Structure formats: C-alpha cells, structure tokens
Image: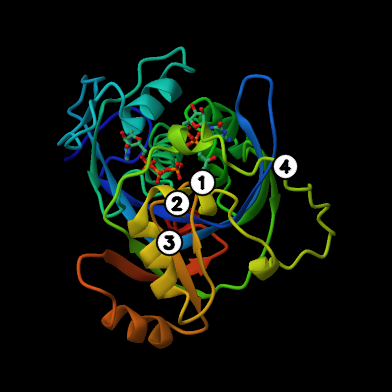
Amino acid sequence: MERDNGPGPVNDFTLPSPAKLNLCLHIVGRRPDGYHELQTLFQFLDYGDDITFRPAEEDNHDIHLEPSIPGVADKENLILRAARLLAGTQNQKLPGVILSVDKRLPMGGGLGGGSSNAATVLLGLNHYWQLGMTLDQLAELGLQLGADVPVFVRGHAAWGEGVGERLTPANPPENWFLVLKPACDINTGKIFSEQGLTRNTPRIKIAPAFEGDASRYRNDCEDVVRKLYPEVNQGLKWLSQFGPARLTGTGACIFGRFPTESAARIIWESKPSGITGFVAQGVNISPLHTKLTELT
Ligand SMILES: C[C@](O)(CO)[C@H](O)COP(=O)(O)OP(=O)(O)OC[C@H]1O[C@@H](n2ccc(N)nc2=O)[C@H](O)[C@@H]1O
Ligand SMILES: Nc1ncnc2c1ncn2[C@@H]1O[C@H](COP(=O)(O)OP(=O)(O)OP(=O)(O)O)[C@@H](O)[C@H]1O
C-alpha cells in the first residue's frame, strides 16, 4: 500500500512482539488498593507474536485491527487500546493504519502477550507517525494499560519492583528455555486473590553488581497454582527432572532452563502428549528494539 503524504513510512512494516519470562517472582507486600507489590526478574524470549502496520489510504484516519483476535473484543484488545491511547495524546489528525497480528503466544499464559502487543503498537506507531516520544513517555503511557507494558516498552531485561513498573536493567544469562503450556487457563486476578498466597517474602536489596542469577529465587504464586491446577503440578514435576523449572507470572506456562538449544530440544522431543510449547532463547535486549533500530 502506498501513501504519498503525511508523516511516517509509506510501506507496510512488521515488528516483533516478544514473550517475557518472570525468571523469579516474589510478592513482598500489598498496596492499599489491593495490588500486590512484587520483585521480579524479567527477561525476553526471542519468540513471540508479529504485528504488521499497514498505512491506510490517503485521507483515511481510522485505526483498524484486521482480523480481530478470536475471543478478544476489539474494544478490550490491548492492540487497539494502545493505538487509541497514543493517538489521544496528539492534537493532530494522524494517518490511518491497519494493524494485524500473527498470534503465537498463548493468551493468559503468563508470557505477557497482551502487554507485549501493546508495547509493540506504542513503539510502532510512534515510528509510523513520527511522534518522537521518548521511551519514558511511552512507558508511562503503557502503564495505564498494564503493569507488564513498561518493561516491553523499555526493551531491556530488568529487575522489576512496585507492580513491575520500577525497572532496573539487568543482565541475566541468556540461557535457552523449554516453555510448556499445560492445558489449563489461569486468571491472574484469581491467583492474586487466593488466601493461601505467600505475600510476605522479604524484600531483596539488589546489589549493584546483581548478575541475574535467579537460581536462589522462586515464584511465590507457584504453590497456590500447583494446588489449584494439577496440569501445572504435573508439568513442573516432569520438567524439573531435567533441571531448574519454574512458573512464569501467574501461569499457566512453565519453563525449564538449559545451557544450549540442543539440550532444550532433546527434552522437547520427549515431552508428554497433550502439552504444547516451544523452545526459545532468553534475550536481554528485546527483539522489538533490535528490529526498530534496523528500521530507523
Ligand atoms: C503477574 C505478572 O504477569 C508479573 O509480571 C503481572 O504482575 C501481571 O500484571 P497485569 O498484567 O497488570 O495483571 P492483570 O491481568 O491486569 O491483573 C489482574 C488482577 O490481578 C491482581 N493483581 C495484578 C498484579 C499485581 N501486581 N497485583 C495484583 O493484585 C489485581 O486484582 C488485578 O486486577
Ligand atoms: N492483544 C492481546 N493479546 C492477548 N490477550 C489480550 C490482548 N488484548 C487483550 N487481551 C486479554 O488479556 C488477557 C491476558 O492475556 P495475556 O496474553 O497478556 O496474558 P498473560 O500472558 O497471562 O499476561 P501477564 O503475564 O501480563 O499476566 C487475555 O485473556 C485477553 O482477554
């Protein structure tokens, strides 16, 4: 599609929308509004969705998502909500855009798919509309959409505090992961409202030389999730035979850590039937930012 006026690229472009893992997730308190205060180590995966940005016809100022994501109403979709939130900060008519998503990440899996989609749209449209907004501005905007959006906007693996929005860049080892999606859907709100959840893990004071070795740390949601979802319990039991295995976010996805791709793939080949998943490398610079640098 060609467009011959207005700001921004005139051709379609596609940007990655990677997954995140919570290499550890500690719940250290609860805010007066009921939200939980966390300490978490975020790392990206070189695996995720792709979002394509297609300029609309000249004089068309609409923002569309085509096709919609089955099961997600457009007005709830974080892709459209992010686009409209960004457009709303501008006092000018902006060129229209047709967004489409190639969805690979399981929804509600703890991989942050929706939040990552929102961040990719914020950065992609900032590029397309040539708004020149800074990552600080976009991260602040993104936080209105979800606690995990800022880390995807900033694009560096990080130690997250608060609800995950206070970020200190970190450099955990870029291991390979086997990520499995047990056959159950887990609602984040349900897990955070469980009575038996550990909410008083002592705060860690991160030394400046923190190297991201998460092996001493855990996911505080894991015990509750294992009790409520036998599929996750089984999956973790199976995966932990081969090395450290953990839940990401509030699940349902679990991951095992491996030093090489081939080590992860060998285990992947022997996974129990009825469980889906993928092998991917943990990366400290988001693939979104790597691609954006190539575009500009
Ligand atoms: C679990 C993580 O994925 C870790 O990275 C995130 O903290 C999830 O953050 P999020 O996407 O903003 O979570 P949502 O799916 O919007 O949260 C659903 C519900 O979970 C509860 N919730 C969520 C995050 C948090 N830090 N404390 C909470 O108590 C709130 O009741 C919220 O209404
Ligand atoms: N673009 C989107 N992609 C995926 N889910 C979306 C999107 N927009 C809205 N949602 C809604 O958000 C819910 C959570 O999806 P998401 O994939 O972000 O979960 P998650 O991986 O558990 O995230 P987190 O780790 O941040 O809790 C979905 O069940 C869906 O209803």
Residue at the spot of label 1:
152
The answer for how far apart the CA atoms under marks 2 and 4 are is 19 Å
* Of marks 1 and 4, the one in the foreground: 4
Q: Residues within 10 Å of mark 1 (few under 14, many from 20)?
A: many
Q: Nearer the viewer, mark 2 or mark 3?
A: 2
In which quadrant is the N terminus drawn? top left
Q: Give the mark nearer the N terminus: 1 vs 2.
A: 1
To which residue does mark 3 refer? 254
The residue under label 4 is 200
Q: Is residue 43 visible?
A: yes
CA gap, disc 3 and disc 4? 23 Å
Marks 2 and 4, the one that precedes in the sequence = 4
Mark 1: amino acid = Phe
Check if mark 1's residue and mark 4's residue have beta carbons within 8 Å: no
Residue 227's tag is: 2
Q: Secondary structure at mark 4?
A: loop
Is the C-beta separation of discs 3 and 1 under 8 Å? Answer: no
Mark 3: secondary structure: strand
What x and y, as percent, mark residue 150? 56, 39
